[in-house]
Image (tube, helix red, strand yellow):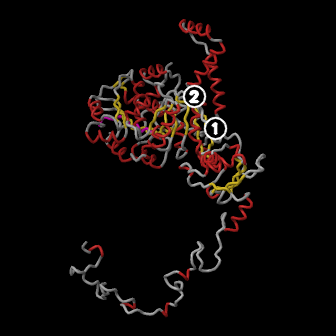
Amino acid sequence: MTFENLPPLLDEALTARGYTALTPVQTAVIAAEAEGRDLVVSAQTGSGKTVAFGLAMAPQILDGGIVSLAREPAALIIAPTRELALQVSRELMWLYGKAGVRIATCVGGMDASKERRNLSQGAQIVVGTPGRLRDHLERGALDLSALKVAVLDEADEMLDMGFREELEEILNATPEGRRTLLFSATMPKPIVSLAKRYQRDALRISTVGEDRGHGDISYQVVTVAPPDIENAVVNLLRLHEAETAILFCATRENVRHLHANLTERGFNVVALSGEHSQSERNQALQALRDRRARVCVATDVAARGIDLPNLSLVVHVELPRDAEGLQHRSGRTGRAGRKGTAVLIVPYQRRKRVESMLRGAKIEADWIKVPTAADIRAKDHDRLLETLLAPVEVEDEDRALGARLLETMSAEDIAAALVRVHRARMPQAADMLDDGSREQPRDNHRAGFDDSVWFTLNIGRRNNADPKWILPLLCRRGGVTKNDIGAIRIAANETHVGIAAAAVSKFAKAIAQPGHDEDNDVEIVQASGPPREAARENKRRGRDGERPQRAQLGVNPRGDKPRGDRPFGDKPKGDRPRGDRPRGDGPRGGPPPRDGARPFRKDGPAPSKHGVKHKAKGNRPR
């Protein structure tokens, strides 16, 4: 296939890569109206922006369709993160490989001396992060005097990360007549200001539709009790069995914790966060590309610039900060026409925030139940049958081995052994404390709990108490199942729970033991009776949200002695009229000076023992 408006060498590279058509943003940047002009481009994540600016700057890189032999860089691409810069370099290498263009990459965490040697040997395209590029520029290793085009990729992210000073210093070192291509997902005021300062008559291109949620991404939301988050992660990975999946956490510590737990459960998993060196990051990403690992646990450092060809599942283990972060994380899948799934794991108490975030991002999400062990077993059965029934070429050696097995075992036994071996290779699904299969009643009486015993928790509506996270807490602390728990009735400051009589002894013994770290603030005690009797008792004692009334004026509500009995005087302050206050013997009617104290002097402070008058405390010798 031949692409219009492109040099033949780039046409061949696109065809060899499997391109049959250009994406909307790629078509827009090479249109006749965009030729030779400065551009401000907004496009969806995964829409082929790297190839887009690679095609847009071709006239400045190639001289008459062939590579320029100039040693100074003709094009400079600035990216916010190391991963994105390396990704851009890889994309441009295959795009300009047939043209013989030399590309130098300059990013933090890599060998700076090696980068300087690459620059000194001549490179037509330089890709790097702002800090490292400025370092090479100040050392004289990077010469931008002949630059023809500068590209700012993810410009909004670079400004958010505080790289404005570096960007200005780099752009100020470039010639006046250069092209400036600014790619930004959003257009906040700082981006507009940057465009006005460094661009001339820029053409605005936007291919972001009204549906900001990526069209090739299916969004799902599962609500869980906070202690069930890790179990939900395990079950989602097992249900989807994606070729590659990324799990996003908020902190490095949580990345370490989840990485260790998934490794222990049998998943092939790598970690990616700011605490890892560039070499470790590269090894982790290469393991995912080689399929030696299938799961990556990462912080938002992987939310931009990570392009894995087989990534089909993104799980937000911890919620992103805002809708923009949600889209950048989710945008790691569903790229270049491929389908992907993004799943948000939402603690019950955060549901409203997530609903608001999805509305702001204009994303339609399916609210689903967390997969159970039974759901996963059913899915495993379907996948195994599909695998075994698929046509394959069988070698003679395998047939001979099968014949030997049939001599000693029946076909049913062989099939059962095959299923058992297949299942043993898979990590076990997790049992959820609350799988969402039924709603725990708040106030309705459950059958079979007529003789239940009531317990009281020291949390209520004012503590955001909710049965959906109280139920797993009771199961964990009390060593019981959800079937042993009856009605849950929530008051302002406390919660009443009915426990089946058969489980009371076990429950009472378990709650007497120290709780888990996250449960230490929740106290569980046996109540004197049903909630109504307890409520009347609380009201009499001034509990359940009512402030206790003082019996008489001057009595401390804590039950201490009356105020008049305190040792600092017999009468409350303010009872003696100011006009009748007796004057003391000291200066200005105050009390006389203590022994050894300096007397008051109208003409200034008294001289110190050093014989120097000090007019300010700061001048006193120490």
In the depicted view, which residue is nearer to us: 556 or 165?
556
Counting from the top left corner in percent of width and height, residue 380 is at: 62, 26
Query: What stretch of residues is rendered in magenta?
Result: 145-153
**What crowding class fits label 2: few (fewer than 14 Cα within 10 Å), some (14-19), or many (20 or more)?**
some
Instruction: Looking at the image, tell me whether mark 2 or mark 1 is earlier in sequence order.
Output: 2
Marks 2 and 1 close (CB-CB < 8 Å): no
Residue 35 is drawn in which quadrant? top left
In the displayed structure, 57 sits above or below 13; it is below
Residue behind mark 2: 241
Magenta stretch containing residue 423, yes or no? no
Counting from the top left corner in percent of width and height, residue 354 is at: 60, 46
Q: Residue at x 27, y 36 (%)?
A: 141
For label 2, the SS is: loop
Q: Is residue 351 visible?
A: no
Tell me the amino acid under the disc marked 1: Val
Mark 2 vs mark 1, CA separation in Å: 15 Å
For label 1, the SS is: loop
Q: In the image, which disc is placed on residue 370?
A: 1
Tell me the amino acid under the disc marked 2: Glu
**What crowding class fits label 1: few (fewer than 14 Cα within 10 Å), some (14-19), or many (20 or more)?**
many
